[in-house]
Amino acid sequence: MRDDFDPSPGAPETLVPSLRRILAPNPSAMTYRGTNTYLLGETDLAVIDPGPRDAAHLEAILHAVSKGQRITHILVSHAHLDHSPLAQALARETGAPVLAYGNAAAGRSAIMTALAAAGADRSGEGVDHAFIPDRTIADGERIDGAGWSLTALWTPGHFGNHLCFQWGSHVFTGDLVMGWASSLISAPDGDLSDFMASCRRLRALGPAVLHPGHGAPVAEATARIGWLIAHRQSREAEVLSALSHGPASAPELAARIYTDTLPQLLPAATRNVLAHLIDLAGRNRVRCDDPLHENSRFSAVPDTA
């Protein structure tokens, strides 16, 4: 964790020319110091991730708009309550449209859609079910403003409707890649198979700097993405090792694996384990004989190689 990252909430900070960051006042175990809201541009401004519904943060964003500037685009990486709810209030104040991949259910894989339909929709991470963008943007679509251009990258994994935004050699990564923690993958909104594919796609772009939804910029971008991929592979090995002792559910496996985790974070850890189990089942590494739900029991598939 980057303990030296501690900006003042509400105070715009210039990161590089044409790019400022405003920290929202919503620190927590899941959000670190709070949500990063980015303002890109010199005249026409893009606001990336307006953040939680908070009057003070709305005022801070509006106050950062100087004479001769206007907010023309509001871009949302994904529909979690710490990223998207302020978008509509900001749109009302500025007249700028809200752009995103889709609503909170957009981008879910078939298996996650079925899991949600079965009732596993209590992720605890705060889904903004009311979120509806003014305009959906597709993977690879370019968004242009005066002096800047962004490319939308559909990068599901942490969330089905998750987008990253590429700005030259910089990428705004939302909650896909952060420097202070690994991304939480919580089914049915999170999908580990998608997460690994999105990380590999992002690494292949060779970005120089990542600007995450929480925490400091990540300068060693490809190395960090590689670490996240290796971390997930290591966690997968732990899940398979724990299953070697016999069939178990995600809560049982989480209790065995996350022995140093604070009790209040164990439910999130359990959802991470479930994401691994679903991914492993899709690759025929584990088997689930029950209908898939949060407390299904899984068993290892013998290696026949």
Image (cartoon, rainbow, N blue to C red):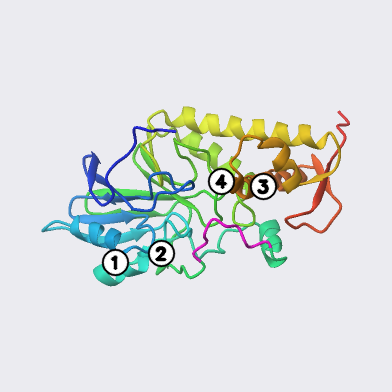
Q: Report x, y in % for residue 114.
A: 71, 62
Q: Which residue is mark 4?
A: 184
Q: Which mark is residue 96?
A: 1
Q: Is residue 17 left or right of residue 210?
A: left
Q: Which residue is mark 2?
A: 85
Q: Main secondary structure of the magenta part?
A: loop
Q: Which residues are magenta?
A: 120-128
Q: Say what secondary structure mark 1 lies in.
A: loop
Q: Report x, y in % for residue 166.
A: 39, 44
Q: CA distance from mark 3 to mark 4?
A: 11 Å
Q: Which mark is residue 13?
A: none
Q: Could you tell which of marks 1 and 2 lies nearer the N-terminus?
A: 2
Q: CA distance from mark 2 to mark 4?
A: 20 Å
Q: Amino acid at mark 3?
A: Thr
Q: CA distance from mark 1 to mark 3?
A: 39 Å
Q: Amino acid at mark 4?
A: Leu
